[in-house]
Image (tube, rainbow, N blue to C red):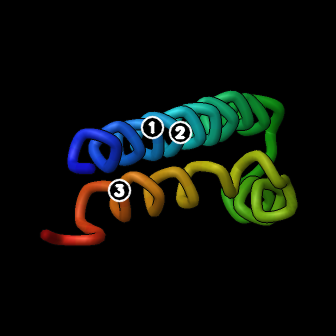
Amino acid sequence: MGLIRMIIRAFVLLTGFGLAVSGGVSLIAYLNLMTTGTGFIEYISFISLRFECYLLPVGILIIWLSLYFPRE
């Protein structure tokens, strides 16, 4: 039973890592808006409306949960 639980936790960890990477790449890609003269406040309001930018905190949360929950 311990091996299966470890495999599931590794799968959840890798899923969270993939989500965090895609969210981080999206945030970095949208930084190109700053070169067109967009201010920082406009940048923040733009990324707050984009779904893919929420993948970074969701991925970090999933990674954290897979590492620290449940403790045995």
Q: Amino acid at mark 3?
A: Ser
Q: Mark 1 or 3 closer to N-term?
A: 1
* Percent of width and height locating residue 62: 47, 57
Determine which residue is flagged by label 3.
66
- Image quadrant of residue 61? bottom left
The dot on residue 15 is 2
Secondary structure at badge 3 equals: helix
Q: Mark 3 or 2 closer to N-term?
A: 2
In the displayed structure image, the side of residue 57 where residue 41 appears, left or right: right
Q: Amino acid at mark 2?
A: Thr
Q: Report how far apart the C-alphas of labels 1 and 2 lie in the structure.
A: 6 Å
* Percent of width and height locating residue 69: 29, 69
Residue most extreme to the left? 72
Q: Report how far apart the C-alphas of labels 3 and 2 lie in the structure.
A: 10 Å
Q: Residue at x 44, y 34 (%)?
A: 14
Residue most extreme to the front? 1
* Percent of width and height locating residue 5: 32, 49
Q: Are marks 1 and 2 in contact (CB under 8 Å)?
A: yes
Picture layout, residue 22 above or below residue 13 = above
- Image quadrant of residue 71? bottom left
Q: Quadrant of the C terminus?
A: bottom left
In the displayed structure image, the side of residue 14 where residue 6 appears, left or right: left
Q: Report how far apart the C-alphas of labels 1 and 3 lie in the structure.
A: 9 Å
In the displayed structure image, the side of residue 72 where residue 34 appears, left or right: right
Q: Amino acid at mark 1?
A: Phe
* Percent of width and height locating residue 29: 69, 28
Q: Residue at x 84, y 53 (%)?
A: 50
